[in-house]
Image (cartoon, coloured by chain):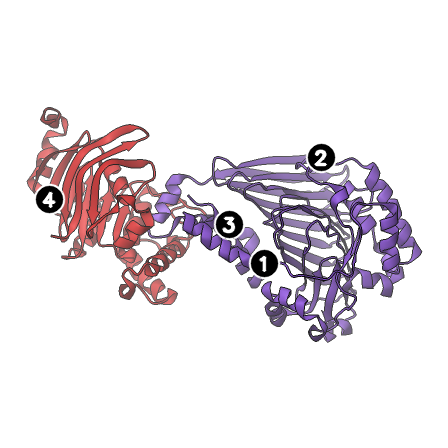
Chain colours: A red, B purple
Amino acid sequence: MEGLFIKDLHVSVEGKEIIKGLNLSLEMGKIHAIMGPNGSGKTTLGFVIIGHPKYKAIKGEIIFKGKNILELPPDERAALGLFLGFQYPYEIKGITFQHFIWRSILALKDKKRNGERFPKNFIEFKKELRKKAEILGVDEKFIERDLNVGFSGGEKKRAEILQMLLLKPEFVILDEIDSGLDIDSVKIVAKTIESMRSPDFGVLLITHYQRILNYVKPDKVYVMYKGEIVKEGGFELAEEVEKTGYKIFENSL
Amino acid sequence: MENLKDILTIDLKKYDFKDDVNYIYTAPKGLTKKIVEEISYLKKEPDWMRRFRLKALDIFLKKPIPRWGADLSGINFDEISYYVKPTDRKGTSWEDVPDYIKKTFEKLGIPEAERKFLAGVGAQYDSEVVYHSIKKELEKKGVIFLDTDTALKEYPDFFEEYFGKVVPPTDNKFAALNSAVWSGGSFIYVPPGVHVEFPLQAYFRINAANIGQFERTLIIADEGSFVHYIEGCTAPMYSSFSLHAAVVEIIVKKGARVRYTTIQNWAHNIYNLVTKRAIAYKDASVEWVDGNMGSKVTMKYPCVIMKEKGARAEIISVSYAGKGQHQDTGAKAIHLAPYTSSRIISKSISKDGGRTSYRGLVKIIKGAKGVKSNVNCDALILDEKSRSDTYPYMEINEEEVDIGHEASVGRISEEEIFYITSRGIPESEALALIVLGFIEPLTKELPMEYAIELNRLIQLEMEGSVG
């Protein structure tokens, strides 16, 4: 079985343990959803998978493509095919969106990833970029602006999805990807994610609310609470959470 | 991150080499009246220059070391050789240039630049210009482009009229020192109405430990003319310090325009103390484009004195200070006439405990109505160990003026770097991307070759200390 495997993971942030002994098997070809209230450790999980310097795995393993990735810097994890759609993407002055993505592609090519699937040159890249920006309703003027600078919340989120499409990752973690999006945009983003379904592509959706799950049908739903997985199930679990809220999980710890 | 450091060492070797040169004359260490007289004698200079040098020496010896700005206590004036003449031959074409010097230039990429947009090359090797070529069309247009020593011989009257007038020896201790022992540099005269289409350039480097380099550049742009002068340098590294105290004087007459571009990467043991000043007459315009990468200490504040109505100044500078470096740089805009305008853009980057300071002056005298001045200085600090300060001085004695001043200090957060690296870009490259984006206002003003070289230097600097 291929996928992203988390074994007995303990994570601390600035000395405080946020995730306590997490076990998860996230198979390729499936869409997984992790739901949980604020502070449950969902975002921490996304950060530690990609390698945020402040989120330290103090114990456990994260295995992807047969490797424990915890020792790898973030760029090496990207080279293995991992991608995080940030909840709050950073604004980077002095690098345009298109320049940034093209540099990322060159870096990934350098690391022998996806060579044949990436555009051969900048002109081809630009064509692909235009096409995909149009699908996502990202205004062309954004791709020539500095990365995320002056983008609205919703524009940033759509730009994250655009990045994902262009960088062609194999396993993606999308952190609150629907926050800040109006309902039409949620539908477009959801449709894009659904369209990427394939046996070689895995998704972990991190979300507080059920809303996006009405448009992206997860195969598996996990409820995270205070740094632990307290319940897992199918789509029906998401509906249950929506009705009852997270309070009822207090006792399951 | 050990690997990165290894890579850096290898790459930097390109910028860190020296040849064994048999110096024909090396002045004894320390500075005395006798040495100054000897320099003047060896150069067969007119008597007025000899007297000028001696007077400057007096001023130098009397003036105290500046107590403001960077720490200069590491300079030992007795340990410096004040004059070195590596060869008696002076090439007029590339073929005449001695092989060992060619080899050095090759490593610095000079022939390439020459092929591309060569007008004349003033290449300074140690304290002497050894190679100088001028395109026929420049001569036809009456443009004079010579090393300063030759210009003194060939155009003595001209020289006496302008030399030392923009930056007198009394200006500061290091201008006085330069005036006493100057050697080499470029002299340019552009006749009225002549536009020099291609940049004139000079390359120079310091090639012996403890040898000071005191070049002296004088540019005169006559009415309605235009010239762009570029100096670029990469210097080898040494264990003991060297001093570079240059003086650049520019006279820009009515309606003329001069752009002076510097990209410098002195070795990290060099004190780089340069006085650059231009006088702009009616409707004239001066642009200083200044990139400071290397040296131990740099103190440099390119200045434009706008003497007559309608004169304009643009001063764009970028400084980078890494470990053990202090870049105290900035700009001066002196408005002495109405309807003059200035724009100052300063960008500084500090990293690995480096320190940058912006020190700038905008002065407007009473009666200079309708003056516009805009100052924009941004600092980027790449880690907790590094530092940046801003010292903007304003002396505004007129009310009907339009003054703008903006300053910002930015730090790159760990999170921003993480965001960039999470897409596949290595950390050193992520830093370089941010820094290059930050200094774009300068790089876009540079000819392509220089922009590329500057980008490469920044990338090397970023690789140097990641982790």
Q: Check disc 4 and give the amino acid type.
A: Lys
Q: How far is mark 1 from mark 3, CA to CA?
A: 20 Å
**Which residue is the site of mark 1?**
B446
Chain letter of disc 4 in the image: A
In the image, are marks 3 and 4 on the same chain? no
Marks 1 and 4: same chain? no
Q: Chain of mark 2?
A: B
Q: CA distance from mark 2 to mark 4?
A: 69 Å
Element marked by disc 3? helix
**Residue closer to the observer: B459 or B194:** B459
| CB under 8 Å between discs 1 and 2 | no
Question: Residue B52 versus residue A42: which sits nearer the camera?
Answer: B52
**Mark 1 belongs to which amino acid?**
Leu
Locate residue B222: give its quadrant.
bottom right
Instruction: Tell me where residue B179 appears, x and y as whole percent.
Output: 81, 49
Foreground disc of the pair 1, 3: 3
Mark identifier at residue A220: 4
In the rendering, at what x and y percent does residue B80 appear?
74, 47
Residue at image mark 2: B395
Front position in the image: B140 or B94? B94
Q: CA distance from mark 2 to mark 3?
A: 37 Å
Sort mark 2 into few (<14), some (14-19) or many (20+) by Cα contacts within 10 Å. Answer: few
